[in-house]
Image (cartoon, rainbow, N blue to C red):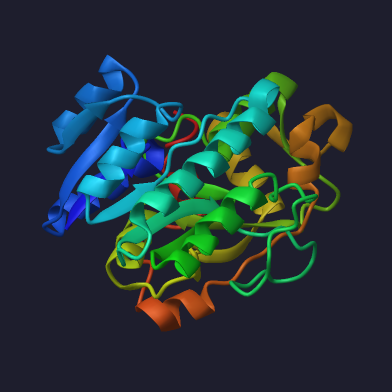
Amino acid sequence: MRVFTTGASGWIGTATTARLLAAGHQVTGLARSATSARTIEALGAEVVRGDMSEHDLIVEQAQRADAVVHLAFTLDFTRFEQTVENEVTLIAKVGSALHGSGKAFVAASGTPILPARLATEDDVLDPAGPAGARARTAEAVLALSQRGIRSALVRMPRSVHGAGDRNGLIATLVDLDRRLGTAAYVGDGHHRWPAVHLDDAAHLLVLALERAPAASVLHAVGEQGVPMREVAEVIAEKTGLAPAAVDPEQLGVFGALLGTDQPASSALTRRLTGWQPTGPSLLEDLAAGYYTD
Protein backbone atom coordinates (compact mmCIF):
# COMPACT_ATOMS: atom_id res chain seq x y z
CA MET A 1 0.00 0.00 0.00
CA ARG A 2 0.94 3.63 -0.43
CA VAL A 3 0.77 5.03 3.11
CA PHE A 4 0.73 8.70 4.09
CA THR A 5 1.90 9.28 7.66
CA THR A 6 1.71 12.37 9.85
CA GLY A 7 4.15 12.44 12.75
CA ALA A 8 6.47 10.13 10.81
CA SER A 9 9.60 11.61 12.41
CA GLY A 10 8.34 11.31 16.00
CA TRP A 11 8.97 8.69 18.68
CA ILE A 12 6.19 6.33 17.62
CA GLY A 13 6.23 7.57 14.02
CA THR A 14 9.81 6.55 13.24
CA ALA A 15 9.25 3.02 14.56
CA THR A 16 5.97 2.74 12.65
CA THR A 17 7.51 4.03 9.42
CA ALA A 18 10.32 1.49 9.72
CA ARG A 19 7.76 -1.29 10.29
CA LEU A 20 5.67 -0.21 7.31
CA LEU A 21 8.68 -0.16 5.02
CA ALA A 22 9.84 -3.56 6.27
CA ALA A 23 6.37 -4.92 5.47
CA GLY A 24 6.74 -3.74 1.87
CA HIS A 25 4.58 -0.61 2.00
CA GLN A 26 5.52 2.67 0.37
CA VAL A 27 5.55 5.52 2.89
CA THR A 28 5.33 9.28 2.51
CA GLY A 29 5.84 11.21 5.73
CA LEU A 30 4.77 14.74 6.59
CA ALA A 31 7.73 16.84 7.79
CA ARG A 32 7.42 20.35 9.19
CA SER A 33 11.17 20.96 9.41
CA ALA A 34 14.39 20.10 7.59
CA THR A 35 15.44 18.00 10.58
CA SER A 36 12.22 15.97 10.44
CA ALA A 37 12.64 15.55 6.69
CA ARG A 38 16.15 14.14 7.12
CA THR A 39 14.89 11.69 9.76
CA ILE A 40 12.16 10.41 7.44
CA GLU A 41 14.49 10.16 4.44
CA ALA A 42 17.05 8.25 6.51
CA LEU A 43 14.40 5.61 7.17
CA GLY A 44 13.90 5.20 3.41
CA ALA A 45 10.53 6.97 3.12
CA GLU A 46 9.52 9.86 0.90
CA VAL A 47 8.94 13.32 2.36
CA VAL A 48 6.34 16.02 1.85
CA ARG A 49 7.04 19.28 3.66
CA GLY A 50 4.20 20.86 5.62
CA ASP A 51 2.43 20.92 8.96
CA MET A 52 -0.97 20.17 10.46
CA SER A 53 -2.32 23.62 9.59
CA GLU A 54 -2.02 22.92 5.85
CA HIS A 55 -5.31 21.11 5.37
CA ASP A 56 -5.36 21.18 1.58
CA LEU A 57 -1.90 19.59 1.42
CA ILE A 58 -2.82 16.83 3.85
CA VAL A 59 -6.12 16.09 2.10
CA GLU A 60 -4.26 15.87 -1.22
CA GLN A 61 -1.75 13.41 0.22
CA ALA A 62 -4.54 11.32 1.76
CA GLN A 63 -6.24 11.13 -1.62
CA ARG A 64 -3.04 9.99 -3.32
CA ALA A 65 -2.40 7.28 -0.72
CA ASP A 66 -4.13 3.97 -0.12
CA ALA A 67 -4.06 4.49 3.64
CA VAL A 68 -3.31 7.13 6.27
CA VAL A 69 -1.57 6.80 9.64
CA HIS A 70 -2.20 9.89 11.78
CA LEU A 71 0.31 10.26 14.63
CA ALA A 72 1.10 14.00 14.67
CA PHE A 73 -0.04 16.14 17.58
CA THR A 74 1.57 19.27 18.99
CA LEU A 75 1.36 19.13 22.79
CA ASP A 76 1.20 22.85 23.55
CA PHE A 77 -0.96 23.42 26.63
CA THR A 78 -1.15 27.14 25.87
CA ARG A 79 -3.00 26.32 22.63
CA PHE A 80 -4.43 22.90 23.46
CA GLU A 81 -8.06 23.61 22.57
CA GLN A 82 -7.06 25.26 19.28
CA THR A 83 -4.87 22.27 18.42
CA VAL A 84 -7.70 19.82 19.06
CA GLU A 85 -10.13 21.97 17.07
CA ASN A 86 -7.71 22.04 14.13
CA GLU A 87 -7.29 18.27 14.29
CA VAL A 88 -11.03 17.58 14.37
CA THR A 89 -11.64 19.96 11.46
CA LEU A 90 -8.86 18.33 9.45
CA ILE A 91 -10.19 14.81 10.05
CA ALA A 92 -13.63 15.93 8.83
CA LYS A 93 -12.06 17.30 5.63
CA VAL A 94 -10.17 14.07 5.06
CA GLY A 95 -13.42 12.19 5.62
CA SER A 96 -15.17 14.22 2.93
CA ALA A 97 -12.33 13.66 0.48
CA LEU A 98 -12.11 9.89 1.10
CA HIS A 99 -15.87 9.28 1.38
CA GLY A 100 -16.77 5.81 0.13
CA SER A 101 -13.18 4.93 -0.77
CA GLY A 102 -12.74 2.07 1.69
CA LYS A 103 -9.28 3.38 2.47
CA ALA A 104 -7.76 2.80 5.89
CA PHE A 105 -7.32 5.67 8.36
CA VAL A 106 -5.54 4.76 11.60
CA ALA A 107 -4.91 7.25 14.41
CA ALA A 108 -3.28 7.08 17.83
CA SER A 109 -5.04 8.01 21.06
CA GLY A 110 -4.72 7.14 24.76
CA THR A 111 -6.15 4.38 26.92
CA PRO A 112 -8.97 5.49 29.25
CA ILE A 113 -8.18 6.29 32.87
CA LEU A 114 -10.74 4.43 34.98
CA PRO A 115 -9.41 4.56 38.55
CA ALA A 116 -8.94 1.11 40.08
CA ARG A 117 -10.71 -0.61 37.17
CA LEU A 118 -9.23 -2.38 34.18
CA ALA A 119 -9.95 -0.28 31.09
CA THR A 120 -10.92 -2.28 27.99
CA GLU A 121 -11.36 -1.46 24.33
CA ASP A 122 -15.11 -1.16 24.95
CA ASP A 123 -14.66 1.76 27.36
CA VAL A 124 -15.20 5.27 26.01
CA LEU A 125 -12.83 8.13 26.77
CA ASP A 126 -14.29 10.57 29.25
CA PRO A 127 -13.89 14.07 27.76
CA ALA A 128 -13.63 15.47 31.29
CA GLY A 129 -11.04 12.94 32.44
CA PRO A 130 -7.25 13.30 32.41
CA ALA A 131 -6.86 11.05 29.34
CA GLY A 132 -9.91 12.40 27.56
CA ALA A 133 -8.65 15.75 26.32
CA ARG A 134 -8.59 14.38 22.79
CA ALA A 135 -11.89 12.51 23.06
CA ARG A 136 -13.29 14.68 20.26
CA THR A 137 -10.48 13.53 17.99
CA ALA A 138 -11.19 9.90 18.84
CA GLU A 139 -14.87 10.36 18.05
CA ALA A 140 -14.02 12.05 14.74
CA VAL A 141 -11.76 9.16 13.72
CA LEU A 142 -14.32 6.47 14.52
CA ALA A 143 -17.05 8.48 12.76
CA LEU A 144 -15.11 8.11 9.50
CA SER A 145 -16.32 4.49 9.40
CA GLN A 146 -19.83 5.83 8.67
CA ARG A 147 -18.47 7.46 5.52
CA GLY A 148 -17.08 4.32 3.91
CA ILE A 149 -13.58 4.65 5.41
CA ARG A 150 -11.91 1.81 7.33
CA SER A 151 -10.97 3.87 10.35
CA ALA A 152 -9.37 2.51 13.51
CA LEU A 153 -8.16 3.98 16.78
CA VAL A 154 -5.04 2.60 18.45
CA ARG A 155 -4.99 3.72 22.08
CA MET A 156 -1.56 4.01 23.68
CA PRO A 157 -0.82 3.43 27.38
CA ARG A 158 0.91 5.97 29.66
CA SER A 159 4.34 4.60 28.76
CA VAL A 160 5.52 3.73 25.24
CA HIS A 161 9.08 2.92 26.26
CA GLY A 162 12.39 1.96 24.70
CA ALA A 163 15.96 3.04 23.99
CA GLY A 164 16.19 6.67 22.90
CA ASP A 165 13.01 7.90 24.60
CA ARG A 166 13.71 11.46 25.69
CA ASN A 167 10.27 13.06 25.78
CA GLY A 168 7.86 10.42 27.10
CA LEU A 169 6.26 10.40 30.53
CA ILE A 170 8.90 8.12 32.05
CA ALA A 171 11.73 10.34 30.82
CA THR A 172 9.88 13.36 32.21
CA LEU A 173 9.36 11.56 35.53
CA VAL A 174 13.07 10.77 35.85
CA ASP A 175 13.92 14.43 35.22
CA LEU A 176 11.38 15.47 37.84
CA ASP A 177 12.81 12.97 40.34
CA ARG A 178 16.28 14.41 39.87
CA ARG A 179 15.00 17.92 40.52
CA LEU A 180 13.18 16.73 43.66
CA GLY A 181 16.13 14.67 44.86
CA THR A 182 14.03 11.54 45.34
CA ALA A 183 12.54 8.71 43.28
CA ALA A 184 8.94 9.69 43.84
CA TYR A 185 5.70 7.79 44.15
CA VAL A 186 2.34 8.68 45.68
CA GLY A 187 0.76 6.99 48.68
CA ASP A 188 1.97 3.40 49.00
CA GLY A 189 2.90 3.33 45.31
CA HIS A 190 0.41 0.63 44.35
CA HIS A 191 -1.01 2.77 41.53
CA ARG A 192 -0.39 1.13 38.15
CA TRP A 193 0.40 2.43 34.68
CA PRO A 194 -0.15 0.33 31.56
CA ALA A 195 2.89 0.16 29.29
CA VAL A 196 4.13 -1.10 25.92
CA HIS A 197 7.49 -1.34 24.21
CA LEU A 198 7.87 1.00 21.23
CA ASP A 199 8.39 -1.79 18.70
CA ASP A 200 5.23 -3.56 19.85
CA ALA A 201 3.21 -0.34 19.56
CA ALA A 202 4.48 0.20 16.01
CA HIS A 203 3.64 -3.40 15.12
CA LEU A 204 0.05 -2.95 16.26
CA LEU A 205 -0.34 0.24 14.21
CA VAL A 206 0.76 -1.67 11.12
CA LEU A 207 -1.62 -4.55 11.90
CA ALA A 208 -4.45 -2.04 12.36
CA LEU A 209 -3.68 -0.51 8.98
CA GLU A 210 -3.57 -3.88 7.25
CA ARG A 211 -6.44 -5.76 8.82
CA ALA A 212 -8.52 -3.98 11.47
CA PRO A 213 -12.25 -3.75 10.69
CA ALA A 214 -13.86 -0.32 10.38
CA ALA A 215 -14.49 1.49 13.70
CA SER A 216 -12.04 -0.74 15.58
CA VAL A 217 -10.72 0.43 18.93
CA LEU A 218 -7.45 -1.28 19.78
CA HIS A 219 -5.23 -1.14 22.86
CA ALA A 220 -1.44 -1.15 22.42
CA VAL A 221 -0.98 -2.51 25.94
CA GLY A 222 1.86 -4.93 26.59
CA GLU A 223 1.61 -4.77 30.39
CA GLN A 224 -1.74 -4.16 32.05
CA GLY A 225 -0.28 -2.26 34.97
CA VAL A 226 3.18 -1.60 36.36
CA PRO A 227 3.12 -0.44 40.03
CA MET A 228 4.70 3.00 40.34
CA ARG A 229 6.48 1.96 43.56
CA GLU A 230 8.41 -0.60 41.46
CA VAL A 231 9.21 2.05 38.87
CA ALA A 232 10.52 4.34 41.61
CA GLU A 233 12.66 1.57 43.07
CA VAL A 234 14.39 0.86 39.74
CA ILE A 235 14.91 4.59 39.15
CA ALA A 236 16.44 4.76 42.62
CA GLU A 237 18.82 1.88 41.85
CA LYS A 238 19.98 3.55 38.63
CA THR A 239 20.31 7.11 39.95
CA GLY A 240 21.27 6.71 43.60
CA LEU A 241 18.17 8.63 44.67
CA ALA A 242 16.16 7.32 47.60
CA PRO A 243 12.62 6.09 46.75
CA ALA A 244 10.00 7.91 48.79
CA ALA A 245 6.32 8.81 48.91
CA VAL A 246 5.81 12.51 48.19
CA ASP A 247 2.97 14.99 48.38
CA PRO A 248 1.21 14.94 44.98
CA GLU A 249 1.26 18.74 45.04
CA GLN A 250 5.03 18.61 44.62
CA LEU A 251 4.61 16.78 41.33
CA GLY A 252 2.29 19.15 39.47
CA VAL A 253 0.35 17.27 36.76
CA PHE A 254 2.32 14.15 37.67
CA GLY A 255 0.65 14.12 41.07
CA ALA A 256 -2.64 12.97 39.56
CA LEU A 257 -0.94 10.64 37.09
CA LEU A 258 1.19 8.89 39.69
CA GLY A 259 -1.62 8.81 42.22
CA THR A 260 -4.24 7.18 40.01
CA ASP A 261 -4.51 3.42 39.49
CA GLN A 262 -5.18 3.09 35.74
CA PRO A 263 -4.56 -0.42 34.39
CA ALA A 264 -5.71 -1.31 30.88
CA SER A 265 -6.28 -4.54 28.98
CA SER A 266 -5.51 -5.52 25.39
CA ALA A 267 -7.31 -8.88 25.42
CA LEU A 268 -9.85 -7.88 22.76
CA THR A 269 -7.11 -6.42 20.56
CA ARG A 270 -5.07 -9.62 20.69
CA ARG A 271 -8.08 -11.75 19.74
CA LEU A 272 -9.05 -9.43 16.87
CA THR A 273 -5.63 -8.85 15.30
CA GLY A 274 -3.39 -11.67 16.54
CA TRP A 275 -1.04 -9.08 18.05
CA GLN A 276 1.35 -10.52 20.62
CA PRO A 277 3.81 -8.07 22.23
CA THR A 278 7.31 -9.45 22.61
CA GLY A 279 9.42 -6.43 23.63
CA PRO A 280 11.13 -5.84 26.98
CA SER A 281 9.05 -4.70 29.94
CA LEU A 282 9.09 -1.15 31.29
CA LEU A 283 11.13 -2.21 34.32
CA GLU A 284 13.62 -4.01 32.07
CA ASP A 285 14.12 -0.88 29.97
CA LEU A 286 14.57 1.18 33.12
CA ALA A 287 17.09 -1.36 34.45
CA ALA A 288 18.95 -1.18 31.12
CA GLY A 289 19.61 2.49 31.85
CA TYR A 290 17.76 3.95 28.87
CA TYR A 291 16.20 6.63 31.08
CA THR A 292 18.98 7.27 33.55
CA ASP A 293 22.37 6.97 31.78
Q: Residue at x 47, y 75 (%)?
A: 269
| Total residue callouts | 0
Q: Residue at x 46, y 29 (%)?
A: 166
Q: Residue furthest bottom?
A: 271
User: What is the quadrant of the N terminus in the image?
Assistant: bottom left
Q: Residue at x 63, y 72 (%)?
A: 120
User: Is residue 200 left or right of 155 when viewed as pictured?
Assistant: left
Please, is residue 13 above or below residue 292 in the view? below
Please, is residue 50 above or below residue 281 in the view? above
| Residue 140 shows in this picture | yes
Q: Residue at x 74, y 45 (%)?
A: 257
Location of residue 117 in the rendering, given as x and y in whole percent from the top left corner? 76, 70
Location of residue 196 in the rendering, given as x and y in whole percent from the top left corner? 47, 57
Q: Nearer the viewer, residue 4 or 170?
A: 4
Q: Nearer the viewer, residue 283 or 157?
A: 157
Please, is residue 146 above or below residue 42 in the view? below
User: Is residue 277 left or right of 140 when viewed as pictured?
Assistant: left
Q: Nearer the viewer, residue 1 or 196?
A: 1
User: Hey, which quadrant is residue 118 in on the image?
Assistant: bottom right
Location of residue 204 in the rendering, given as x and y in whole percent from the top left corner? 37, 63
| Residue 197 shows in this picture | no
User: Is residue 23 left or right of 191 when viewed as pictured?
Assistant: left
User: What is the quadrant of the C terminus in the image?
Assistant: top left
Location of residue 21 in the rendering, given as x and y in whole percent from the top left corner? 15, 50
